[in-house]
Image (cartoon, rainbow, N blue to C red):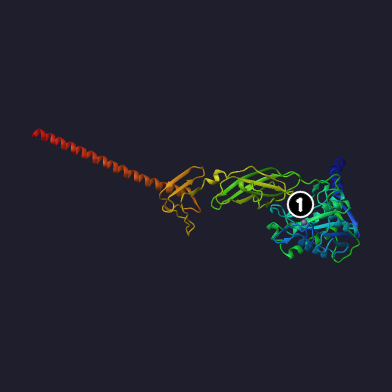
Amino acid sequence: MKAWGSAMIRKSIVPMLFCIGTVFMSCVLSCNAMAYENIVIVIDPGHGGPGTEGETDSGAQYNNVQEKNVDMITAQALYEELSQYGNLTVYLTRTEDTHMDLQERVDFAKSVGANYLISVHYNASAHHRFYGSEIFTSAFGEEYAKGYSLAATIMSWWVEDGCVSKGIKTRIGRNGDYYGLIRMGREAGIPTIILEHGYLDNDTDFTHLNTEEAWKHMGILDATAIADHFGAKKGVVSAGIEENLVVAVPTGQMDDDQTPPVNVSFTIDGYDPVSRVLSYTVSAKEQDSFLMYYDVDTQTLAADEDKGFMHLNVWQNGAESMQGTYIVPEGYEGPFVARVYNNYEKFTDTEPVTIPAEYLGNTIMLSGNGGTYIGGSDGDTGITGSEMPKVTLQDGSGATWTLEGALDEAKGADFIVDPDNLKENVRHYIGFIAAIVVAALMLIAALVLAIASNVSRKKRKNSRNDINNTRY
Ligand SMILES: [Zn+2]
């Protein structure tokens, strides 16, 4: 009994130690709660200015929208909403469309004793391919831990609201943090984050971010998220509020990801020549950040940075591979390339891949030479001899068939003839040729017979003459 009891105690010590370790670890990581009576938050509408020469700072400009105006609408909605919460004091760096240096913005935040500086922006990219929302924070010290933690709460509210997350990121420049506002904010001891609410130059985002109502909604959402992060209550002043850090204060710099995804592979799983829909699987790995987008394009478009991969798909969080479909441009017969991006916009393209012959083998592609395509009301098509005097057919193995003359009722859709019909047509055609050949042979035979009989008649006549001669 005693021995059994001590064994129990020994057994339970290990999980107990593990429990203590977990509690300790999670304290380091997330129980780092700091209590405040009041938190000062400075909201900074990005950009701004009258747009005079040398002073133009309108931010992204697309779809007849200037980013500085959208930033202001969202920032003002954020300010008005957040001001209604207890234990929070909220300021705006600017309320007019005026030019303001980054240092001036930080100096203002410092002057009002800001605990946080939050800059409000919308995004755009060089080739207009990206969409989604991202938040930048300092890569260093307490500014990283506090900025990242606040950003994580805001991002979770954004994602809940339907935004695509491009992550909470750092960006390293030559002098530390790449973004001036974040760098200067840190120098002033103010955790500073840049909210990139979405892309004004990409329809995936812009269709949801194209009205004043939508821009105000984002501001109210930001305010709700920020209040949630600090546990502040609307219209209620509490004894105190607090913030939780979800990441530890780093000792070094939190690097941005400078390397693209690895082990990127691409297979074509199927192809339907009628609809030209190609189905595929893309696999990839990303150790430093996360996989963000994937797409497939023709090799021609893939080589054109301005036109290729313009319809990026979102890589499902944590997935090892993704499946998709691609509509092959009409007439394209070359190979295809897949591209995978990580959330730092670094990408890897695969080697070109051609459609496996097995997916082309069931149908025979038909390219007309002076041929005409006739559409049928029942979905079938009829190609007749008069419209299609000569056609070249290629089957899945690459073998070509050239047919001249009548092609009766070659059925199929959009320049595709199914092999059974083709065989039938070939059979008809061969039958037709055979008939001509047989007829010609019979004619020759008849001629030969006729000549032969004529010769023998002449011979007989001559011999008769001979006979006659001999008779006379
Ligand atoms: Zn901006």
In the rendered structure, which amino acid carries the disc numbered 1? Gly
Q: Which residue is rendered at x = 80% and y = 64% of the image? A: 77
Where does the image place residue 104, in percent across and percent down from the top left? 86, 57
Where does the image place residue 227, in percent across and percent down from the top left? 83, 60
Specify the quadrant of the image occupied by residue 438.
Answer: top left
Specify the quadrant of the image occupied by residue 456.
Answer: top left
Q: Nearer the viewer, residue 70 or 135?
A: 70
- Where is the N terminus found, in terms of image quarters? top right
Specify the quadrant of the image occupied by residue 225.
Answer: bottom right
Circle 1 packing at 10 Å, graded few (<14), some (14-19), many (20+), is: some
- Where is the C terminus found, in terms of image quarters? top left
Q: Quadrant of ligand 1?
A: bottom right
Q: Nearer the viewer, residue 98 or 348?
A: 98
What residue does disc 1 label?
167
Q: Where 351 sits versus 185, above or below? A: above
What is the residue that sits farthest to the front in this orientation? 53
